[in-house]
């Protein structure tokens, strides 16, 4: 399985420049809709409302920011609405947990292509795996995952990145498991772990901090396992902001099984690298409808750049999520999204076969 290009995961830590001065457009007296493609109370909604509380002061004219939730279809109902029905007048912005896998495999539920949107910003969001401690022979440390002989892994819809990354990671680690997919949200999966319907899952750091830690980790019912390594310039590193969460990295576990210098290879590894590099850079993405006014797009990009430097927003985000926000703004993120159209036919064919099996 070959990629045309290797995505730069380090882009999550950069903010692009904005070139010419912005047009003097004012949003005074206006309402800007922040469209969230998951339901109220979930991790996407929590982050979206944090942004809504602070974004207006960084937009000329200080408009009101109105949150509208449009859940369903694994996030695709909201994405489709923004791409096909929302007015391209600069007054609607989508805050999405997006799923590039649906575009790669040409899933019928996705009616648009993400690279047709006007990209504004992306927010990095690490993923942490966790597991019930009472899975035989006992899971007290991350390495104990490798000793298990069978369990159920809970996930969202079959084609969403959370599900596919779970499958790829466990397959590469050669850990036997059965997948139980179809849960509506990460909190629902955590509840299923609590009730022992499934025994392993993962969540974004927002979900992990707000639901999984108080529900499962602090009561001693589950063990933190691993997070995905950050890839930059061909090298892999632990995420430095996750030291407090007592996890190892995916490659740490792989090497615990195969040797200190071992590296995965093959189609599954290339697929996992691709999805990780995209999602670790821009787990949440901010889009505007296709063909939105250029000045409105630049204003929103500038607003998110200012938001990324706003001490009040940074403090609120860190208090809720557990780490400070890491944003990709403007052209850098657009380039990452455009890579979805540059994948080799061989990669797409093999990846589609894996996802659909």
Image (spheres, grey):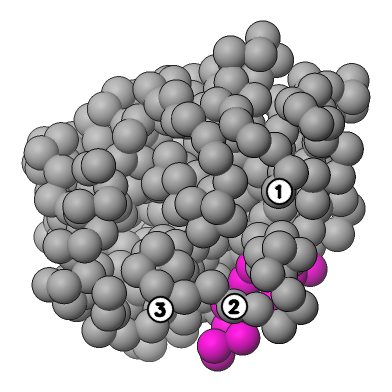
In the picture, measured across the screen, residue 284 lies left or right of residue 134, that is: left
Which residue corresponds to the image point at 59% horizontal and 21% vertical from the top-left?
A: 198
Q: Tell me, for residue 7, which label it has, or none.
A: 3
Q: Tell me, for residue 23, which label it has, or none.
A: none
Q: Nearer the viewer, residue 11 or 117?
A: 11
Q: How crowded is mark 1: few (under 14 residues within 10 Å), some or many (20 or more)?
A: some
Dot placed on the residue nearer the N-terminal end, 2 or 3: 3
In the picture, measured across the screen, residue 45 lies left or right of residue 286, that is: right
In the picture, measured across the screen, residue 206 lies left or right of residue 42, that is: right
As drawn, 142 above or below 31: below
Element carrying mark 3: loop
Looking at the image, is mark 2 or mark 3 nearer the viewer?
A: 2
As drawn, 94 above or below 21: above
Q: Which of 104 and 178 is in front in this view?
A: 178
Looking at the image, is mark 1 or mark 3 nearer the viewer?
A: 1
* Quarter of the figure with residue 294: bottom left
Which residue corresponds to the image point at 40% horizontal and 63% vertical from the top-left?
A: 268
Real-space Cα distance between discs 2 and 1? 16 Å
Element carrying mark 1: helix
Real-space Cα distance between discs 1 and 3? 29 Å
The quadrant in which the N terminus is found is: bottom left
Residue topped by disc 2: 263
As drawn, 32 above or below 267: above
Magenta-colored span: 229-240
Residue topped by disc 1: 146
Dot placed on the residue nearer the N-terminal end, 2 or 1: 1
- The answer to whether residue 342 is seen in the rendering is yes
């Amino acid at each position: 399985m070959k990629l045309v290009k290797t995505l730069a995961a380090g882009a999550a830590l950069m903010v692009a420049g904005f070139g010419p001065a912005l047009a003097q457009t004012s949003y005074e007296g206006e309402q800007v809709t922040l469209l969230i493609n998951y339901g109220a109370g979930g991790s996407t909604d929590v982050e979206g409302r944090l942004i809504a509380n602070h974004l207006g002061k960084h937009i000329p004219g200080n408009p009101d920011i109105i949150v509208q939730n449009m859940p369903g279809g694994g996030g695709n109902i909201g994405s489709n609405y923004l791409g096909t029905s929302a007015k391209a007048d600069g007054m609607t912005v989508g805050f999405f947990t997006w799923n590039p896998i649906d575009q790669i495999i040409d899933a019928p539920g996705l009616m648009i292509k993400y690279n047709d949107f006007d990209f504004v910003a992306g927010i990095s969001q690490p993923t942490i795996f966790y597991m019930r401690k009472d899975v035989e022979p006992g899971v007290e440390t991350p390495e104990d995952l490798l000793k298990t002989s069978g369990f159920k892994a809970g996930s969202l819809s079959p084609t969403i990145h959370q599900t596919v990354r779970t499958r790829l990671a466990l397959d590469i680690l050669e850990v036997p498991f059965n997948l139980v997919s179809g849960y509506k949200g990460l909190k629902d999966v955590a509840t299923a772990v609590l009730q022992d319907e499934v025994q392993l899952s993962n969540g974004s750091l927002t979900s992990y901090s707000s639901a999984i830690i108080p529900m499962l980790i602090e009561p001693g019912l589950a063990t933190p396992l691993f997070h995905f390594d950050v890839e930059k310039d061909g090298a892999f590193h632990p995420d430095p902001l996750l030291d407090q969460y007592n996890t190892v990295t995916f490659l740490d576990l792989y090497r615990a099984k195969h040797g200190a210098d071992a590296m995965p290879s093959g189609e599954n590894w290339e697929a996992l690298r691709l999805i990780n590099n995209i999602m670790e850079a821009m787990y949440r993405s901010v889009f505007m409808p296709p063909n939105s006014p250029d000045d409105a797009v630049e204003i929103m990009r500038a607003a998110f750049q200012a938001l990324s430097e706003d001490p009040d927003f940074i403090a609120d985000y860190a208090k809720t999520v557990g780490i400070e926000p890491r944003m990709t703004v403007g052209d850098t993120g657009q380039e990452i999204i455009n890579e979805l159209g540059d994948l080799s036919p061989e990669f797409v064919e093999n990846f589609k076969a894996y996802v659909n099996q």
